[in-house]
Image: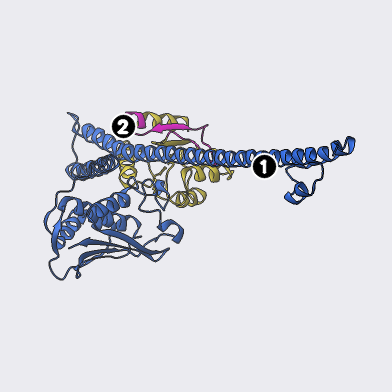
């Protein structure tokens, strides 16, 4: 049968227009029913063209999706990085503030003491008492700085993955009493009651110095955020693990902040309001995890917080 | 007047200045200090810490400037921070004592304000 002339051209152009729009009006039935073999071949060619174009279009869509995913991932990584830089800057600002404040006190008290020693200056009867008082405060600034430097070193070790535990026989009851003895002055200064519930020995194999650090950080935290209310510390052994609980009745932690408090550089209460670098709970949780244990918090705003540490026996 | 929440530093500042014969009122809480200023005598200088719980140094300064009775009292900011803005308030117009500072820097600053008062 002869080529259908302009009528055929119109049909082809119509099909092409549809294909160009991403659709196809040619079906197998139309091809089979086509009486003109040349036209039939053209229709088959158009079908193949449509399929090729559809395939290319799918490929392009997939490529675009992949590009979008990559772009989103890149944006997420950039955002993570921005947040990390912001956290680091905040940490440095807090660290600078925390280091410079006791340094200023040290500097002022030392100058003041030197001035009091100036030859020719007549010492009044209260001078010795004032000097003793100043020296006591000097000592406290040194302790504050020492604790800060220790905290920074912990952070440095943990972030470099160098938290080397040296396990040995430990009685957690002794650790708790030693830590509380060290806080004696601070507890008196803050006029806080600390109740200890440690009915019997709780012996196990842990790294004593690091567990001491965990208890120190939890007690320090309870003193800072305990609002002067009583603090309870308990130690007990259960079937498979030892449990240390430190409970305060202070400011507490809002629900939405509780998941973050064991992260680095994330203090639930604004950092500028409390002494320290705000890394104590992160350091504690890293040590507990490295010891095969776990740490959790139960807290309500204005009612206080209970930190529970479980260590394998 | 000293407004600083750090007990040790506040007491050291107070001791050093009292030893020089200055009359010093010291506050750990900026809000309490503000009330004292509104009701009590006017100091010739306020040494102001920035990072404090409750009312911050920036907020204190904003409240001070909003009160015609208090706005002319000179303020020297005592800070370890490099930032003079808390995002809302700025203190770029104020004199700063950067921590750590020594007694002579402190006393020179205080004496200059005492002489100007």
Q: Nearer the viewer, residue B15 or A259?
A: A259
Query: Which chain is indicated by disc 2?
Result: B
Residue B104 appears in which quarter of the rendering?
A: top left
As drawn, is A212 to the left or to the right of B43?
left
Q: What element does badge 2 sit on?
A: helix
Q: Nearer the viewer, residue A26 or A153?
A: A26
Asked if residue A270 lies in the magenta stretch, the reply is: no
Q: Please report the residue visible at 13 percent of the width from the left and 57 percent of the height from the top.
A: A205
Whether the residues at callouts 2 and 1 have beta carbons within 8 Å, the answer is: no
Residue A145 vertical position relative to residue A28 in the rendered view, above or below: above
Residue B9 appears in which quarter of the rendering?
A: top left
State how far apart marks 2 and 1 are (Cα).
86 Å
Q: Total label count?
A: 2
- Depth-wise, is mark 2 or mark 1 nearer the camera? 1
Residue under label 2, please give it.
B103
Q: Please report the residue visible at 26 percent of the width from the left and 37 percent of the height from the top.
A: A106
The colour applied to the residues of chain B in this rendering is yellow
Q: Main secondary structure of the magenta part?
A: loop
At which x and y percent is residue A186? 24, 54
Query: Which chain is indicated by disc 1?
Result: A
Residue A238 vertical position relative to residue A98 in the rendered view, above or below: below
Res A226 seen here = yes
At which x and y percent is residue A203? 12, 63
Badge 2: residue crowd in 10 Å (few <14, some 14–19, many ≥20): many
The colour applied to the residues of chain A in this rendering is blue
Residue A51 numbered mark, or none? 1
| Residue extent of the magenta highlight | B82-106
At which x and y percent is residue A293? 25, 58
């Amino acid at each position: 049968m002869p080529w259908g002339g302009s009528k055929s051209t119109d049909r082809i152009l119509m099909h092409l227009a549809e294909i160009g729009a991403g659709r196809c009006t040619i079906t197998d039935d139309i091809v089979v029913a086509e009486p003109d073999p040349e036209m039939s071949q053209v229709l088959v060619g158009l079908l193949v063209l449509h399929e090729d174009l559809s395939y290319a279009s799918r490929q392009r869509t997939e490529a675009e999706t992949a590009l979008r995913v990559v772009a989103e991932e890149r944006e997420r990584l950039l955002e993570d990085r921005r947040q990390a830089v912001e956290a680091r800057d905040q940490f440095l600002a807090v660290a600078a503030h925390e280091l410079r404040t006791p340094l200023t006190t040290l500097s002022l008290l030392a100058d003041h003491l030197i001035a009091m020693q100036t030859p020719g200056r007549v010492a009044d009867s209260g001078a010795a008492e004032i000097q003793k008082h100043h020296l006591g405060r000097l000592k406290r600034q040194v302790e504050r700085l020492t604790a800060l430097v220790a905290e920074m070193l912990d952070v440095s070790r943990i972030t470099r993955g160098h938290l080397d535990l040296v396990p040995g026989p430990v009685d957690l009851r002794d650790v708790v009493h030693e830590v509380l003895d060290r806080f004696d002055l601070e507890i008196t200064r803050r006029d806080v009651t600390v109740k200890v519930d440690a009915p019997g020995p709780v012996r196990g194999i842990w790294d004593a110095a690091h567990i001491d650090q965990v208890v120190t950080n939890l007690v320090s935290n309870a003193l800072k955020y305990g609002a002067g209310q009583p603090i309870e510390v308990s130690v007990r052994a259960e079937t498979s693990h030892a449990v240390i609980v430190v409970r305060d009745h202070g400011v507490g932690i809002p629900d939405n902040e509780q998941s973050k408090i064991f992260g680095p550089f994330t203090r639930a209460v604004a950092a500028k309001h409390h002494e320290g670098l705000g890394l104590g709970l992160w350091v504690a949780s890293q040590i507990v995890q490295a010891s095969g244990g776990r740490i959790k918090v139960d807290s309500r705003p204005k009612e206080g917080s209970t930190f529970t540490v479980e260590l394998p026996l | 007047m000293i407004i600083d929440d750090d007990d040790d530093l506040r007491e050291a500042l107070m001791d050093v200045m009292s030893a020089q014969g200055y009359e010093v009122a010291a506050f750990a809480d900026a809000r309490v200090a503000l009330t004292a200023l509104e009701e009590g005598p006017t100091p010739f200088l306020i040494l102001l810490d920035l990072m404090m719980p409750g009312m911050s140094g920036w907020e204190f300064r904003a409240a001070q400037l909003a009160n015609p009775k208090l706005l002319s009292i000179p303020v020297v900011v005592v800070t370890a921070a490099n930032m003079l803005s808390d995002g809302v308030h700025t203190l770029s117009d104020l004199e700063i004592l950067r921590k750590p500072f020594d007694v002579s820097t402190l006393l020179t600053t205080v004496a200059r304000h005492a002489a100007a008062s």
